[in-house]
Amino acid sequence: MPITDFPYTDQQVLELAKKYPTPFHIYHEETIRNTVRGLKDAFSWCPGYKNYFAVKATPNPHIMQVLKEEGCGADCSSGTELVLSDRMGFKGEDMVFTSNNTPLKEFKKAKELGALVNLDDLSHVEFLHKAEGLPELISFRYNPGPERTGNVLIGDPKEAKFGSTKDQ
């Protein structure tokens, strides 16, 4: 997909490459903010909609701050991401914790911080209930399996390893 609104000229990128070791990433704050605002506008029909940014995608404190200012939450998949998000000022339900093969200490951290806990499979319910006690609110990652066909972006749901199925 061509980038039609790339904010830098080829010459500017070449000058940056002379100044900074390559490879490097270039982030454009205005583009990030406009993209988040466009997403919020697209879901304006849904009261209470909140986008949760996958911290593992770019655990960059500067970008996380921009996303927080734009009203995003933090989607965390590890204890480290929970701690980073907490230190960046995301609190309580501004964080959601979705993880697989998760040690108990990370579930404890999510509960301690008041993050929403999104469980990967039903076995985690009994595990948490016995070991730590369930948070007041939990949700489940859904795996549609053969109910849905895939595409180049999401892959084939029939091959997904994680999530609870409709039958469960």
Image (cartoon, helix red, strand yellow):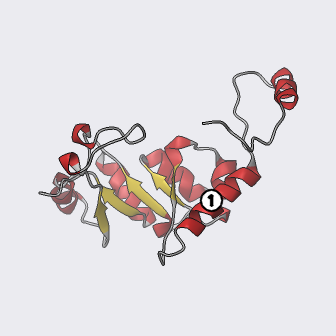
Picture residue at 58% right of the left edge, 44% below the top: 59
- Which residue is labeled 1 in the image? 36
Q: Give x and y (percent) for residue 75.
A: 47, 54
User: Which of the 4 image quadrants contains residue 66?
Assistant: bottom right
Vertical order, 155 against 91 (above or below): above
Picture residue at 47% right of the left edge, 75% below the top: 46
How many numbered marks does the figure carry?
Answer: 1
Towards the viewer: 43 or 108: 43
Which residue reaches farthest bottom?
Answer: 47
Q: Callout 1: helix, strand or loop?
A: helix
Vertical order, 11 against 86 (above or below): above
Indicate the amino acid at tag 1: Val
- Please say whether residue 26 is visible from this viewpoint: yes
Q: Give x and y (percent) for residue 125.
A: 19, 59
Towards the viewer: 64 or 37: 37
Q: Is residue 51 left or right of residue 108?
A: right
Which residue reaches farthest left?
Answer: 167
Q: Residues within 10 Å of mark 1 (few under 14, many from 20)?
A: some
Quadrant containing the C terminus in the rendered view = bottom left
Picture residue at 20% right of the left edge, 51% below the top: 147
Q: Give x and y (percent) for residue 86.
A: 55, 58
Vertical order, 61 against 92 (above or below): above
Towards the viewer: 23 or 45: 45
Q: Is residue 12 left or right of residue 158?
A: right
Quadrant containing the N terminus in the rendered view = top right
Q: Is residue 145 left or right of residue 95?
A: left
Q: Give x and y (percent) for residue 106.
A: 37, 50
- Please say whether residue 109 is visible from this viewpoint: no
